[in-house]
Amino acid sequence: MGRLEGKVAIITGGARGQGAEEARLFAEEGATVVITDVLDEQGKACAAGIPRSNYLSLDVRSETAWEQVVDSIVAQHGRVDALVNNAGIDLNKRFELTTLEDWERVVAINQTGVFLGMRTVGRAMIAAGTGGSIINVSSVAGLEGVRGRAAYGSTKWAVRGITKVGALEWGEHNIRVNSIHPGFIETPMTADLRAFNDPATRARAEKIVSLRRMGQPIDIAWMALFLASDESAYCTGQEFVVDGGVHH
């Protein structure tokens, strides 16, 4: 019997990368998985290859879209047991060159999107009375300052903070809220970084990782599975760092 047998999970940004890997693993462990994204063709293709999954288009910046998606899932399945707030974008730009437009776009997706997801699913979990697990994907950039990441890092610190507030307020409803902090993970979002596409830079980067390799989406998916399952039943409000040992 799978660790998520009978559970219903929503994964944002699930069309590719970490989200797609989480969807596959959750389904293998028995969950009914709803994959959401704005990359509709990739999302549909991803869901088509995963049992007990379907795809719903979702712009995480939209309050109305979140309500429609969660309402449809509750109408069909009766509840939501797990939410992985995985959707996000990166921005590598020096502080003084970051425009207000840059800032607002990153905040809208990485921070407001997480807030809306937590609030909408939190309300549904409270109404159902069955508890649940909310997993917010932050970053090691939410634990320390990273050059070139004024906007991105700010949102990831915010995700870390809102995770703790959700855990404090919703514990009485048996809703657990935790954050995952990935390090160097090889995904479509990071493909343009020199640490992944330049062999010499990659070799130098891997030397500062205790495990001497870049992370893969499955590394994050295993942590998300732990946090979505009853194996983490006494964990809430915590940061789980998955970075191969860069932070000690």
Image: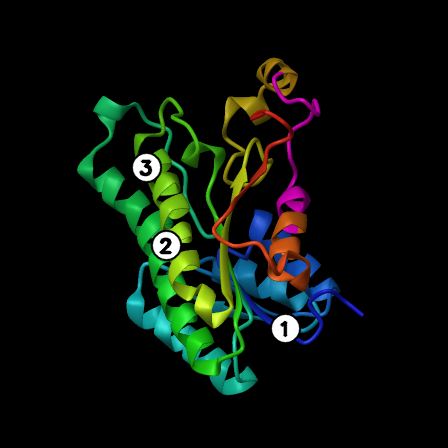
Mark 2 or 3, nearer chain start: 3
Left or right side of 127 for 11: right
* In the image, residue 173 above or below residue 169: below
**Residue 103 rendering spot, x and y as whole percentages:** 25, 39
Q: Main secondary structure of the magenta part?
A: loop
Identified at 32% across, 27% down, the residue is 93
Q: How many marks?
A: 3
Left or right side of 58 for 154: left
Q: From where the camera sits, is residue 84 visible?
A: no
Amino acid, disc 1:
Lys
- Which of the numbered marks, if any, corresponds to residue 154? 3
Mark 1 or 2, nearer chain start: 1
Amino acid, disc 2:
Val
- Asked if residue 248 is among those painted magenta in the image, a careful observer would answer no
- SS at mark 3? helix
155 and 38: which one is in front?
Answer: 155
Q: Which residue is mark 2?
A: 165
**Residue 139 rendering spot, x and y as whole percentages:** 48, 38
**Residue 142 rendering spot, x and y as whole percentages:** 42, 36
Q: 10 Å neighbourhood of mark 3: few (<14), some, or many (≥20)? A: some
Q: Tell me which segment is drawn in magenta.
A: 208-221
Identified at 55% across, 33% down, the residue is 183
**Residue 84 rendering spot, x and y as whole percentages:** 52, 58
